[in-house]
Image: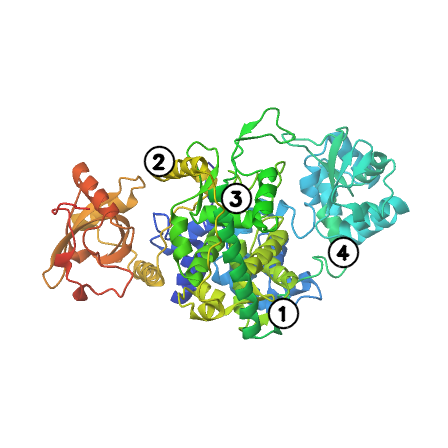
Amino acid sequence: MEKTPPPPPAYIDHLRSLPDRALVALLAEHWLLCSPPVPQTFPRLAAEMVRLGLSFGSEPRLNRFELEVRDCLRILGPRGVPRGELAAELGPTCDRRALNEVIGRLLGSGLAWEDADGVHLLDVHADPTIQDRKMAGLGRPVRALLAVQPRERLDRIARAQGLHGEDPVDAIAIAFTDADAVRRLVAALDPRARKLVEVLATTEAQSSCWLHGDEFSNYGKEALFDQVDGRDARSLVDELADRALLLPVPGSGEKVADFGARLLNVELPREVGLALRGPSPYGRLHPRAPALDAVDVGVGIVDRAGAAEVLATLETTARLLAVCGSDPPTNRRWRRRPHDREPIPSAGIDERELDRLAAATGIDTGVLPLLLEVCAEAGLLTLTPDEEMWLPTPAHETWLSDRPSARWTMLARTWIDMRRSTHHSTAADDEGPVLGPVRSTDPGERRALLGVLAELLPGHAAAPGRVVALLDWRNTCYRYDAPARVLQAAQEAAALGLIGRDALTSYARGLLSGDTDLRALDRLLPAIVRPPRREPRTAAALADLRERRVHASRYAVPEPESRRYRPEPRWEPDDAERALIVHAWRQADRHPNPPAREPHKIAVLRAAAAELSNGNVRRLDVRDPRGRSWTTLAEIILVTGGVVLAIELIDGLSFTMPTTWITRVSEVPHEEYRRYAAYRAFPAKPVPDPRRPVSFWDVDLAEVWHPSQSAQP
């Protein structure tokens, strides 16, 4: 494992200069308190920020313009860039006011710092090789591409440009720093070769192309090769490679590019793209978010349109559960995709069963997979232990007898939080069939869609395409097919009644904000939504189904995590605890030299906080200034500034406590730990919530359970 480089001293001073509110926001944005050990000083905080900056996928989410500015700073390298130079480098389309906002965002997030030399980007200072990556629609630097070329290729390039020297890579790289010389080199090409270079240079995110045999592979780049004649492509690329205008890239596991490979990737050097792009080398910038152009439809119209869909959803769901109870769909236990040699174990409902259910219930085939997935996730539909069919659970009887608004709330919340893909999928799709084992997705796409609509005024609608454009600018979803998934989520939200006339309904707003008052929806729905009448069945069929249902309710096992992808609960501190950590950093700066001999109690606490094993649990005997005593078991994660920050073993809630209150720290016997574990599952007495206003004077701590008592469920 490579060692993380030390943080620059100027960056540590920048962190010290941030106000406390900005430091609290930095802790919340980077999740620095969720995994011990917590940084206890500003130098350790800077070292942790360097480690996070060099870790893939750990940086905060930046919008499109912030990514464009970050890429420009990365390309300019590990040096200070004045704001005026940065604006000139971005081109005439750069908005200076938006640029200053982005720089403030990077400084506040700890991704950069600013001094007399200009703005410095943290990750490129820690690892200068970052600037050799492909970014901003440009290829890698010519020096990085020349380093993987064979010697004979380098000699041919140097002779063609009249360069001399022991190291041809340095000579060619220095020659390519002159943009005018690069333009003259491109102008001397024949029209066909010049057209290929210009198209690759001026087209965003298309700085490379592939050769398959003697032809261009135009997969995904049809518009590019409509402008360039693809005949005799390899000789054309060979001519450009001898001038270093288009260089081959080594394949996977290779160190030197092999031009004779049948499948070859060639890339345009970054200097060529910057020279040919003119005054806007980074393309068209996006300093402002796309406008939604909201239209006032009216709250009443939106709510009535959504209520109609809510009523239809409740009726179709009840009808679907009734059909599944009387004539259950069979489960497909095996499936075989086109590239599978043998059938593989699977689960789900295939297309034939879907067509049968659609014919029996009268539900559209586009909505039926959505209802099946939501019912299974909500616990209304389950697979029998013998994995033969899908049956309604006993909980669906309770659901049918509940109020219509409560029934809809259960379905809507399940859809919002569900980590399952709900769009229709064929048997050959990689995501598998409906109710299959592999249909994972990110619920953030649904929440992001509803969140954008919730930002509008009540009754205002926005077209789904404009919402997708705004989410793409915010860089909310990382998947390549995120726009299509957001559009699919908009259709599903409209089918469930969360959206009416492209606007968020008032009761959906209450659902997102945590408001359980759905009287507005109750007034729009009929007083009683009767479940459909079930078709009569023979006595033998009813007895068989009853036996299967009883067997399923008695012996059902929990579904594996690979089927439902339930996220593990994650402890998240609040802003008060983050502010306490910032206060401890300030104290450490004011008193950098602690006493040589500290009390044994604090030494034991520090040792417990430094342990990273799961056995990091200690028993704390506490006595407050009013003389009240109690005992608790906690996992200590930080001891600094005379304060202990810990997680209580009972239910994972965090609390802070002065070290002067702790009278003794001791190990936890195994038997006592087991009693606490039993109490955690079945609490016998209420436990004070440390997240509420921290005041030990308002709580009768004598009523709190401690290990000396027996745990009774």
Determine whether, in the image, residue 241 is placed left or right of residue 634. right
Q: Position of residue 628 (x, y in %)?
A: 11, 59
How far apart are labels 3 and 2 at the CA level? 27 Å
Q: Position of residue 492 (x, y in %)?
A: 57, 55
SS class of the residue under badge 4?
A: loop
Q: Earlier in the sequence, mark 4 or mark 3?
A: 4
Residue 135 to residue 519: above or below: above
In the rendered image, which residue does mark 2 sit on? 555
Q: Earlier in the sequence, mark 1 or mark 4?
A: 1
SS class of the residue under badge 2?
A: helix
Badge nearest the viewer, 4 or 3: 3
In the rendered image, which residue does mark 1 sit on? 96
* Marks 1 and 3 close (CB-CB < 8 Å): no
Q: Earlier in the sequence, mark 1 or mark 3?
A: 1
Q: Position of residue 437 (x, y in %)?
A: 51, 38
SS class of the residue under badge 1?
A: helix
Report the residue that reaches farthest toward the left: 627
In the rendered image, which residue does mark 3 sit on? 440
